[in-house]
Structure formats: structure tokens, C-alpha cells
């Protein structure tokens, strides 16, 4: 308890003075430790400081996951992951994007009408997808516009993300600015919150850890899956310190702790990888136990998501009422 507690309680109860945080993750496969360190850990750390809205971006996932069974399972999985990592539904509004899909889809449409094709063609995610895929669906091309709608419809001030999402938050700012210039002041300009030391968590091959590169360590993998992933870290034979192992190890131990371990085991890759696997398992173990316990009562878990969806939808619909007025659709 500090000297500002009285003020804090006033703010907390009033909720008026807290800034708004919003972020989401796609349910498009098992989450990995890059998602945890780059994003989820920030959501948990900031849940007291901000009025927080954290969601499951299932509409975005539909751009790549077109299997109903897999999508439903993934939505459940990410919900459990969020809760197991420490998101407290008493503090955070946890919801599924499609539960406010009507409002957010409509706002994305409004934004489409003031956003140009050449502007979106410059988006990094589209350029990447365009290079790799034979055909890019319209949803993937329009992905940043839907993301802008997610952020702006809740009046978010802060958007905690990994570095790969920075451009998307900048696009949301540009779109907010364009809408405000066209129709009058309506939207706040959000700021990305990026933790520099974990902005790009490296994967098994040293590139950014990413589902699409197949270089991940699963966040809630079994011990055997974690061991297998760590054994697969690409090591540059000959070096005293295997850089790819060290870069991941830094997430779990301080540099001081690692210095003695790596000095004592120069060139002994197997020992160093075993130590890393042990540290990951020790870190994840308690969260995995919590996740297993939560999974025993799925009705409760779903009810948390449902209640969050109702709250987020009410806010989104109120914002859309203002948007209708601004664009000239509110005639009664
Ligand atoms: P997604 O599902 O790809 O990733 C979720 C979060 O994890 C972060 N992340 C990483 N951070 C550091 N190092 C890595 N290797 C790494 N890999 C992933 C991502 O930066 C992200 O913060 N477009 C979003 C979902 C979304 C969203 C939003 C986010 C939809 N609407 C509105 C914020 C606000 C996405 O695909 O994240």
C-alpha cells in the first residue's frame, strides 16, 4: 500500500481515468513462446494499470483456417491459454472477436471506403503472403483494416504487440486520422506497446518464431514436445556458444545466470540444450497445471468469454451509433 492508494482506488472504482488497452491473438494453431513473451506477458503485466480488452481474433483466423472443427478447438485453446497465463477475467474483458462481429465488420467496411488499394498493397503481411501464396484472399488483403476496426471501435489508447504487428497499429492510426479528417473527430489515435528485448522472439532457426515458419516452441507443449523442439534448435557447429540456444535461453534466465552456465560448458551443445529444456519446463509447468485445472470446467470458461463478448459488444455498438451519426446515416 503506498501513499497514492486513495487516488488509485478512486480511479479504479471510477474506471474513468484508466487508459484503454486492447490486443488480440489469432486462434490459428498452438500458441508459442513468441506469443507469450511478445504479447501475453504484457497483457498480464498491464491488466491492473489499464482498462483492458483482450480478445481472440477468430475473424482474422478465418483468412487462413478454413476448417470449422479446428477453428472451434483453437478458440477454446487460446481462451484457456490466456487464463492459464494469468489473465484475470475480473480485471480484463476477455472476448471473442466474432461476438462483436457485426459492429466490427461494419466499421471495417466504413474504413474500406476511405482506404486505397495502393496503401494496403504496401502492408508487409500482404507483401509476404503475396510472395508465398499463389492466391491471396480478399480477407488477407483487408486484414489490417479489420484490425484497425478492432482497435478503434473500443477507443484503445495502447495496443501491446510484438514488433511484427507494429505496422498494423500504424495503419490503424492512419485510418483513424483519415476518418477524423473526413467526418470530424471520432477516433483516438492508438499507440503500439512493444517491449524492445522481446520485440522479435527468435525461433529454432534464429528467424522470428512463427507458426508459418514451423520453428516454434509450443507454449503449452508436453515435456516431450518441448524437449523435441529444443533438440531441433539449429546450432552453428564450432562456436563456443550456440547463439540460437542462447537467444532463447535469455528469455528464461538472466544474462548473469547464463554467463556461468555457458562459460562452464563451452561447445557442449547437448548439455546447454538440456539445461534450456529444463528451464522452459520449469517455467511452463505451473501454468500448464493451471490450464489443466481450468479445462475441467469448460462451461465456466465459455461463460467468461460470453460475458466478455456482451460487454465488448455494448461498447462497440455505442461507438457505431456515433459513427452512423458522423457519416450521415443517422436520420432517426
Ligand atoms: P498473432 O496471432 O500473429 O500474434 C499474437 C501476438 O504475438 C506476437 N508475436 C510475437 N512477438 C514477439 N516475437 C515473436 N516471434 C512473435 N510472434 C508473434 C504478435 O506480435 C502479436 O502481438 N494481427 C494480430 C491479431 C490481431 C490484433 C488485433 C492484435 C487482430 N486484431 C488488434 C492487436 C490489436 C495477429 O495476427 O497476431
Image (spheres, rainbow, N blue to C red):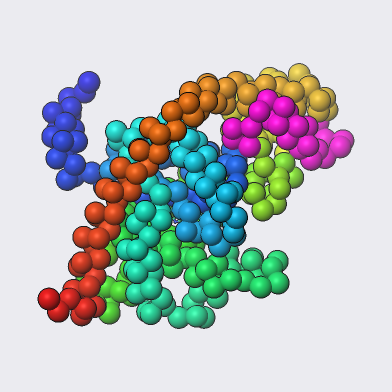
Q: Nearer the viewer, residue 303 or 11?
A: 303
- Residue at 64% over, 66% down: 129
Residue 217 picture location, percent across and down = 66, 37
Residue placed furthest toward the right:
238
Decide whether residue 239 is among the magenta residues. Answer: yes
Q: Nearer the viewer, residue 165 or 92?
A: 92
Q: Nearer the viewer, residue 308 or 32?
A: 308
Query: Height in image: 231 above or below 305?
Result: above
Q: Note whether residue 48 is visible.
A: no
- Residue at 34% over, 74% down: 110
Query: Height in image: 67 above or below 307?
Result: below
Which image quadrant: the C terminus?
Answer: bottom left
Q: Note whether residue 146 is visible.
A: yes
From the image, give the main secondary structure of the stretch colored magenta. loop
Residue 186 lies in what quarter of the image?
bottom left
Q: Is residue 211 left or right of residue 159?
A: right
Query: Height in image: 49 above or below 28?
Result: above
Decide whether residue 81 is among the magenta residues. Answer: no
Residue 38 picture location, percent across and down = 52, 43
Q: Nearer the viewer, residue 37 or 296?
A: 296
Residue 221 picture location, percent across and down = 64, 32
Q: Is residue 250 left or right of residue 139?
A: right
Residue 88 picture location, percent across and down = 36, 32
- Residue at 54% over, 45% down: 74
Which image quadrant: the N terminus?
Answer: top left
Q: Is residue 257 left or right of residue 83?
A: right
Which portion, as a residue range, is magenta? 218-240
Amino acid at each position: 500500500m503506498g501513499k497514492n492508494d486513495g487516488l488509485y482506488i478512486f480511479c479504479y472504482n471510477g474506471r474513468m481515468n484508466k487508459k484503454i488497452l486492447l490486443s488480440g491473438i489469432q486462434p490459428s494453431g498452438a500458441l508459442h513462446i513468441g506469443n507469450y513473451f511478445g504479447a501475453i506477458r504484457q497483457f498480464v503485466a498491464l491488466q491492473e494499470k489499464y482498462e483492458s480488452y483482450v480478445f481472440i481474433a477468430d475473424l482474422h483466423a478465418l483468412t487462413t483456417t478454413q476448417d470449422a472443427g479446428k477453428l472451434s478447438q483453437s478458440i477454446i485453446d487460446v481462451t484457456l491459454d490466456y487464463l492459464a497465463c494469468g489473465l484475470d477475467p475480473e480485471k480484463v474483458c476477455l472476448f471473442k472477436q466474432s461476438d462483436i462481429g457485426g459492429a466490427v465488420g461494419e466499421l471495417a467496411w466504413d474504413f474500406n471506403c476511405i482506404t486505397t488499394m495502393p496503401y494496403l498493397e504496401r502492408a508487409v503481411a500482404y507483401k509476404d503472403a503475396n510472395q508465398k501464396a499463389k492466391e491471396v484472399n480478399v480477407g488477407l488483403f483487408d486484414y489490417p483494416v479489420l484490425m484497425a476496426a478492432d482497435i478503434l471501435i473500443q477507443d484503445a489508447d495502447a495496443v501491446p504487440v510484438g514488433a511484427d504487428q507494429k505496422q498494423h497499429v500504424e495503419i490503424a492510426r492512419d485510418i483513424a486520422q483519415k476518418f477524423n479528417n473526413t467526418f470530424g473527430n471520432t477516433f483516438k489515435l492508438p499507440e503500439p506497446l512493444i517491449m524492445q528485448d522481446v520485440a522479435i522472439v527468435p525461433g529454432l532457426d534464429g528467424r522470428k518464431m512463427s507458426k508459418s515458419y514451423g520453428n516454434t516452441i509450443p507454449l503449452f507443449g508436453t515435456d516431450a514436445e518441448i524437449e523435441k523442439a529444443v533438440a531441433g534448435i539449429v546450432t552453428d557447429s564450432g562456436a563456443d556458444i550456440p547463439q540460437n540456444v542462447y537467444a532463447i535461453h535469455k528469455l528464461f534466465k538472466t544474462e548473469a545466470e547464463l554467463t556461468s552456465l555457458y562459460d562452464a560448458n563451452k561447445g557442449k551443445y547437448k548439455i546447454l540444450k538440456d539445461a534450456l529444456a529444463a528451464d522452459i519446463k520449469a517455467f511452463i509447468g505451473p501454468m500448464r497445471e493451471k490450464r489443466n485445472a481450468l479445462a475441467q470446467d469448460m462451461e465456466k470458461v465459455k461463460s467468461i468469454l460470453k460475458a466478455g463478448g456482451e460487454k465488448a459488444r455494448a461498447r462497440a455498438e455505442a461507438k457505431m451509433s456515433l459513427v452512423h451519426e458522423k457519416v450521415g446515416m443517422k436520420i432517426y
